Image (cartoon, rainbow, N blue to C red):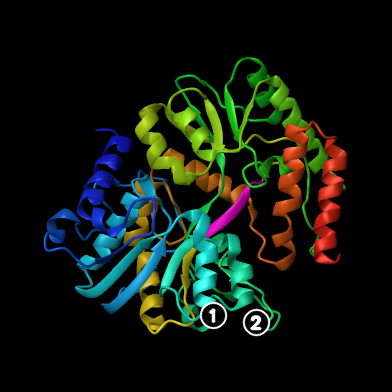
């Protein structure tokens, strides 16, 4: 049985055991404790069935130590937004199930929230004195939520406990706020790294384009390429053309070089036949059904893309230009409610959920690039995303960056939808960002 097929067997088995833990499209709650059959259905092992032994020379996170797993007891409520029925959901349920087997006195109430709502709902509820004990999400809003007082400062709690973790993930878990005395502090327990890369169907694409020139040539030659039209998925091209978003003071300098060339390239790709999507699910479906041969998207699609394409699925870094492409490298992790009554338990739980055993499940079954040490990467797809994350730009955790999304998202839409001049669009976006930041 192939690695991909074994991964799916393990994933669907876990989903069947813990299906009640997460609801459908709306938020639901369900108490989750170790099931009576868990010992045989969700074995206590370093890696789930199907992960296999890493071949000699396989990549793994640095270091060999992981947080100690002390028995936990009590009750917690957590939020996630993995999406019911998706690949990440099944892996998360399996990892949680393994943890519950070894913590018989722990009860976890799992609440699935739509990704579009989870940040706003967390901040609203926590600042009102409520909210769950913890939630897991990307570090999209880490700075703003930490600065608003919606996240617990974990500096003391994590001191010395993440020494062997991936350094990019560690850095992505910190922010400098008005309350940290000018130094970055932990506000998250890091779980994984995420950066976009190029997915492709290797039955139709023999060699993935390695450069922006190669990509243009391939699209003109008939490659059906799908791109998410937004300021996140497309950012890596700006680095490939030599662009820099901000200087050390947080001032936007995108109008000085690179960005306008990248935006002109977006226009040229569209003229050549590339298809842009404002609906990410539509892009996903078109790739899974064969309407697209290549797309730029993230590792969170791994299980669903593997189900659709099987052994024909492959991934490569975004094409380089005059420099390497630098997609945003974000860190996913666990955030703790500063108002919670169970903060110590929540932190201990989060550390166990990012331990080697749990992270092996998320890496092998959901394609997560691990933050934890000792996790084997024996899948070329996961390794491809690990390489993409290594080349990427760590998502800035500073106030000025919050004003990037609107101006540059609008600029991309103007360039692609209204054929606006790329140089002027970038200049306007950079000015709007600096005006908002009073730079």
Other-residue count near label 1 (Cα within 10 Å), few / some / many at <14 / 14–19 / ≥20? some
Disc 1 and disc 2: Cα gap in Å?
A: 10 Å
Residue at image mark 1: 155
Answer yes or no: do the residues labelled 1 and 2 have beta carbons within 8 Å? yes
Locate residue 293 relative to residue 44 in the image: left or right. Answer: right
**Which residue is drawn at the image coordinates 30% and 42% (left, top)?**
7
Q: Position of residue 72 (x, y in %)?
A: 28, 77
Mark 2, secondary structure of its residue:
loop
**Residue 107 painted magenta:** no
Q: Is residue 202 left or right of residue 376?
A: right
Is residue 322 in view from this perspective?
no
Image position of 10 (left or right of 178): left
Residue corresponding to mark 2: 180
For the magenta stretch, what is the residue range?
Answer: 326-332
Label 2: how many Cα within 10 Å (few below 14, some 14–19, many 20+) = some
Residue 100 found in image quarter: bottom left
Above or below — where is 327 with respect to 42?
above
At x 85% / y 48%, what residue is drawn?
428
User: Sequence-wise, which precedes: disc 1 or disc 2?
Assistant: 1
Q: Quadrant of residue 55?
A: top left
Magenta stretch secondary structure, dominant = strand
Q: Is residue 42 visible?
A: yes
Q: Depth check: 258 or 141 in front?
A: 141
What residue is at 72 percent from the left and 39 percent from the top? 413
User: Residue 392, how many percent across, how many down?
Assistant: 63, 49
Q: Residue at x 70, y 67 (%)?
A: 398
Q: Nearer the viewer, residue 267 or 244?
A: 267
Residue 201, x across and y down, in percent: 47, 26
């Amino acid at each position: 049985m192939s690695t991909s097929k074994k991964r799916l067997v393990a994933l669907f088995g876990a989903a069947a055991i813990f299906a009640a833990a997460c609801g459908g499209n709306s938020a639901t709650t369900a108490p989750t404790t170790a099931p009576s059959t868990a010992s045989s259905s969700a074995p206590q092992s370093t890696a789930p069935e199907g992960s296999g032994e890493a071949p000699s020379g396989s990549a793994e996170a640095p270091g060999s130590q992981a947080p100690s797993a002390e028995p936990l007891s009590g009750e917690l409520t957590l939020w996630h937004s993995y999406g019911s029925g998706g690949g990440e959901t099944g892996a998360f349920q399996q990892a949680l199930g393994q943890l519950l087997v070894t913590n018989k006195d722990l009860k976890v109430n799992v609440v699935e929230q739509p990704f579009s709502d989870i940040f706003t709902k967390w901040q609203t509820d926590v600042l009102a004195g409520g909210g769950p004990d913890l939630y897991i999400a990307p570090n999209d809003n880490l700075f703003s939520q930490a600065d608003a007082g919606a996240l617990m400062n974990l500096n003391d709690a994590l001191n010395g406990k993440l020494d062997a973790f991936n350094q990019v993930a560690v850095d992505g878990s910190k922010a400098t706020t008005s309350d940290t005395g000018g130094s970055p502090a932990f506000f998250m327990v890091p779980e994984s790294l995420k950066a976009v890369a190029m997915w492709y169907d290797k039955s139709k694409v023999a060699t993935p384009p390695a450069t922006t020139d190669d990509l243009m040539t391939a699209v003109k030659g008939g490659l059906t390429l799908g791109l998410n039209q937004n300021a996140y998925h497309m950012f890596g091209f700006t680095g490939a053309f030599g662009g820099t978003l901000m200087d050390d003071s947080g001032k936007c300098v995108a109008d000085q070089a690179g960005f306008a060339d990248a935006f002109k390239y977006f226009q040229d790709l569209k003229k050549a036949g590339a298809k842009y999507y404002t609906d990410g699910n539509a892009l996903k479906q078109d790739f899974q059904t064969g309407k697209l041969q290549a797309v730029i998207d993230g590792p969170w699609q791994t299980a669903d893309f593997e189900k659709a394409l099987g052994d024909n699925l492959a991934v490569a870094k975004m094409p380089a230009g005059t420099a390497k492409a630098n997609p945003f490298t974000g860190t996913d992790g666990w955030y703790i409610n500063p108002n919670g009554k169970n903060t110590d338990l929540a932190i201990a739980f989060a550390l166990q959920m990012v331990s080697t055993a749990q992270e092996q499940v998320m890496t092998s079954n959901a394609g997560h690039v691990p933050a934890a040490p000792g996790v084997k990467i024996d899948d070329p797809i996961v390794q491809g995303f690990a390489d993409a994350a290594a080349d990427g730009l760590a998502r800035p955790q500073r106030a000025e960056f919050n004003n990037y999304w609107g101006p540059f998202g609008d600029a991309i839409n103007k360039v692609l939808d209204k054929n606006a001049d790329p140089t002027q669009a970038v200049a306007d976006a950079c000015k709007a960002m600096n005006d908002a930041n009073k730079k």
